Amino acid sequence: MKIYPTFNLQHGHVVPAGQSEPCAVSPLDLVAWVLDQGATRFALVDVDAAQGSGNNRELIARLLQYARSQGPKICIQVAGGVRSSDQAQFFIDQGATWLVVGTLLHKSSLVVEQLVARFQPYLTAAVDARGGQVHRSGWADATCMSATGLAARAKAYGFRRLLFVDIPEEPEADPDFATARALAQASGLPLIMGGSISALEHVEQLQTHAGVKGALMDALQFQRDPRLLAYLAAACA
């Protein structure tokens, strides 16, 4: 099971998952700490870009450059606002390993086709869903599409990797492992799960579900629970 410490970036700061108050530690210092703990992968989420309220593009570029300076075998996923070939190329040039495409899957088949044609090995399709129903635009907009329906669309486009972002009904709700399992089985694609994975027991439960290859977890959680650090050293892939 590959765990990705995840940095939610808003207004130039790291923001704890589900909160709006920024973390006191700088994004660069927190990335450096995670790498010092042996991490071989992590994820960056531009919350502002996902919500259409600005972006953290230059900050992400600095974090990518710093990580690359620490070692070539660090895999980094970038999500939030990847909506054009120019944006995709920018992040790849800075050192991103994977780029997450979400809202575009609903809004522009032409741009999605262009991205897949140019950047297929780098792309991950995001399925953001609550109770099996897809949401988009930074979770602000519910749709009538099922999670499995969107996964099928992503596979038809040519995506080779899925990210299931489970939007909890309430902060302490149990992760929706049933939808994760259904997505993995229906698509046949490697699946990473995030959104509701917030504790060691969630990671342990996730390992029992075939097809689920990894999980995103708030990077700050690794400071709160050192037991999670054991999951950081698996080879980047």
Image (cartoon, grey):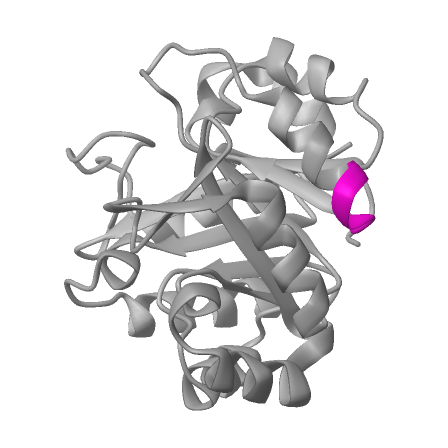
- Whether 147 is drawn above or below 166: the answer is below
User: Where, by quadrant of the figure, is residue 167 drawn?
Assistant: top left
Q: Is residue 70 visible?
A: no
Percent of width and height locating residue 120: 70, 78
Percent of width and height locating residue 208: 81, 17
In-image side of 55 versus 122 (left or right): left
Is residue 141 or residue 146 the one in the foreground? 146
Which residue is found at the position 73% from the left and 74% from the top? 121
Q: Is residue 125 magenta?
A: no
On the rendered image, what quadrant is the C terminus found in?
Answer: bottom right
User: Where, by quadrant of the figure, is residue 180 drawn?
Assistant: top right
Which residue is found at the position 53% from the left and 78% from the top? 112
Q: Give the range drawn in magenta.
A: 185-189
Is residue 34 or residue 106 the one in the foreground? 106
In-image side of 137 versus 218 (left or right): left
On the rendered image, what quadrant is the N terminus found in?
Answer: top right
Is residue 1 or residue 94 the one in the foreground? 1
Residue that sits furthest to the front in the current view: 144
Which residue is found at the position 79% from the left and 23% from the top? 209
